[in-house]
Image (cartoon, coloured by chain):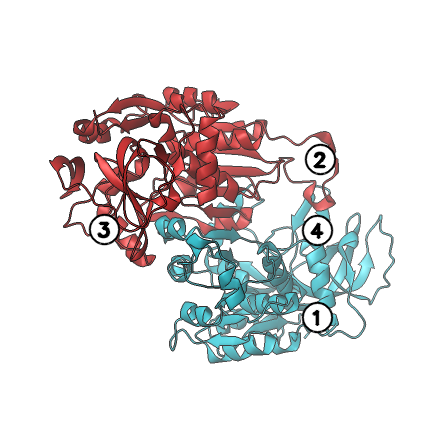
Chain colours: A red, B cyan
């Protein structure tokens, strides 16, 4: 079968053997797979990723061997391996979180030498993890389940009580997923910042109420304008707090993931802000802890999602509660993957590019 | 009156005018005032402290003018200013959080050009903030209210639900206060690490159940030995979590406050750990966000305490629930302050040095 393979630091197209489903596994045809910012990071910082996997006790990629990326997929059942219940017929469209139950335990799909990811004509999934795609939902939209789940999880980890005003820094696919999840959670107003006009327009379409161009106005100042306490809230404060600015609680979602960004957030954040770090910064970073201390900031790093959050995300897209179509800016074949990695550097041109290996 | 004054980067002894109580203020004789690690930091990194105060919208010290440090004090009422209710008689021993209500608003005591701190014969306090020292409690122990409140606050901000196993990194006055507050909160076992034998002995005396010398064994490994889930807790985990190490939730208190320490905590911390940053690191710091991300760490920076936490801390000492006497390793006069700043560098020699300006 054909696949876009990560080999010697580059994405190349080559033939590889179709995998054979083992016990409890299912062979699927890959219908659609989104290209994730983490894939771009992984190509650029593969050695860092290996080092981090080692430091956190995960199985690292062997960079001398092939890897097929792709962990945001929608597939069609082709064949079952031994020990399967076969409740879903061949031809059924399914999603799954990118994990495979193997005799060695649960392993990841997408950054693995052994488990083929979604940039290939076929792959293996685990029967117990399959979620049937509700009838009629297009595979390229069902493939957005994974990135939406990242936003749903980030919002769940933010410990929202209801009165907070959120600020989303960066409106790439991660920021957009956070905005969609915040809107569903009912927070209002949602403030979002991005330098790109195209991304700001998408942010508004997905649920941001106020969009900020940081070149024109300071995101934290704009946030503060929209986070003023009501007179009743002001009056309810204990005496010693009455001299602090009368602002509602802040939840800041860092959805950029480059060095220096967190320090910028520390500088801009109001006192007692909760910061959810959703952007994946793979390099070392510098910050001034005194800013965190003097403002009593809380920083929640997040990664991934739970199986329940993943399943809920597929339902949200299928029910039309998230405008998935808005995020897809191109659909390409396997031959287009390398170029798509380059194209995604321009936020005006693309948000989510979907790989359709059968094209 | 005599005072130990921070002038041109050094602590010198000089005469200064006794302050006059304004509206709502009280003139007090300073009976005892603890030397805090922050005072040592402030002398060494005064310009950083000014920069940070500016960045966080606080009134910075003017370093060309005198400052009298000292914010951990117990005093005796001498005289009242205008507009006071005078419920407590002159001679009454009092504590107060280090803040002064002035016509310009609430200002800090201890890092201020205008409001004299506790390293002077007399100072001003605000009548509404006075707490009477319960009968018989020695001033040098009542003066420990402030550092204990730091520990009480840190534990309150840790959002403890009851099943966590805490690890305290660093057993200086801040770490010891955290240990005391954890013991009162009922957590068990409390694991604490420090390179100093004297500090480890004190940690055990204040409530640590397991003390670790990081030269001999890795604190996080020792923590894990004592944080194993029960069989019932293991069985109650969702299937996908069953492959993770079966550890109780971790709360790690960083009580050192030097660059690089937080990165060490990121490396050692188990997945989903909550980290409470109580140590005050005044320099820039470097860390790898990927470690935080892959472990979904939560970092809560803390500073100070609430008025309620402060009052509760005085009661805890007065009721004998905290072995305050154990922490006091020397009592000195104003002439001894400069030398005490130097002596505090050796953790074997000293924990808390109390200044008694009347000596």
For residue A234, which numbered disc appears in the image? 2
Q: Earlier in the sequence, mark 1 or mark 4?
A: 4
Q: In which quarter of the view is residue A345 placed?
A: top left
Nearer the observer: mark 1 or 3; the answer is 3
Residue at the image point whose x is 62% and y is 70% from the top:
B183
Identify the element where label 3 is drawn: loop
Identify the element where label 2 is drawn: helix
Asked whether residue B254 is in view, the answer is: no
Identify whether B50 is placed above or below A37. below
Looking at the image, residue A61 sits to the left or right of residue B22; the answer is left
Q: CA distance from mark 1 to mark 2?
A: 35 Å
* Disc 1 and disc 2 on one polypeptide chain: no
User: What residue would you read off at disc 1?
Assistant: B317
Q: CA distance from mark 3 to mark 2?
A: 54 Å
Structural crowding at the residue carrying mark 4, measured as other residues with C-alpha within 10 Å and reported as few (<14), some (14–19) or many (≥20): many
Nearer the observer: mark 2 or 4; the answer is 2
Q: Position of residue B175 (x, y in %)?
A: 54, 67
User: What residue would you read off at disc 3?
Assistant: A61
Give the quarter of the figure containing the N terminus of chain B: bottom right
Q: CA distance from mark 3 to mark 4?
A: 59 Å
Asked whether residue A259 is in view, the answer is: yes
Looking at the image, residue A277 sits to the left or right of residue B339; the answer is left
Q: Position of residue B10 (x, y in %)?
A: 50, 62
Q: Position of residue A350 (x, y in %)?
A: 30, 24
User: What residue would you read off at disc 4?
Assistant: B100
């Amino acid at each position: 079968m054909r696949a876009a393979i990560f080999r010697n630091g580059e994405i190349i197209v080559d033939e590889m053997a179709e995998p054979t489903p083992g016990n409890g596994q299912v062979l699927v045809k890959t219908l659609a797979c989104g290209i994730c910012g983490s894939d771009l990071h992984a190509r650029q910082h593969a050695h860092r990723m290996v080092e981090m996997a080692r430091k956190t006790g995960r199985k690292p990629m062997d960079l001398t061997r092939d890897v097929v990326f792709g962990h945001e997929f929608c597939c069609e059942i082709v064949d079952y391996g031994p020990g399967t219940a076969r409740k879903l017929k061949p031809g059924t469209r399914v999603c799954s979180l990118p994990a495979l139950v193997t005799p060695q335990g649960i392993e990841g799909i997408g950054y693995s030498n052994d488990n083929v990811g979604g940039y290939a004509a076929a792959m293996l999934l685990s029967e117990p993890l399959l979620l049937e795609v509700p009838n009629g939902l297009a595979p390229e939209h069902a493939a957005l389940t994974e990135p939406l789940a990242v936003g749903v999880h980030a919002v769940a980890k933010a410990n929202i009580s209801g009165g907070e005003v959120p600020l989303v820094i960066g409106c790439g696919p991660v920021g957009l997923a956070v905005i969609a999840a915040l809107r569903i959670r009912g927070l209002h107003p949602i403030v979002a910042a991005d330098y790109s006009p195209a991304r700001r327009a998408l942010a508004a379409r997905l649920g941001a109420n106020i969009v900020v161009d940081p070149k024109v106005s300071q995101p934290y100042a704009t946030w503060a304008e929209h986070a003023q306490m009501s007179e009743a809230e002001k009056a309810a404060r204990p005496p010693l707090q009455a001299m602090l600015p009368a602002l509602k609680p802040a939840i800041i979602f860092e959805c950029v993931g480059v060095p220096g960004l967190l320090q910028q957030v520390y500088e801009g954040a109001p006192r007692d802000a909760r910061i959810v770090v959703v952007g994946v910064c793979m390099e070392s970073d510098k910050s001034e802890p005194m800013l965190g201390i003097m403002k009593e900031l809380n920083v929640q790093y997040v990664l991934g999602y739970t199986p329940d959050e993943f399943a809920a995300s597929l339902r949200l897209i299928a029910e039309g509660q998230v405008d998935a179509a808005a995020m897809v800016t191109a659909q390409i074949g396997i031959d287009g993957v390398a170029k798509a990695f380059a194209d995604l550097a321009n936020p005006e041109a693309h948000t989510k590019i979907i790989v359709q290996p059968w094209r």
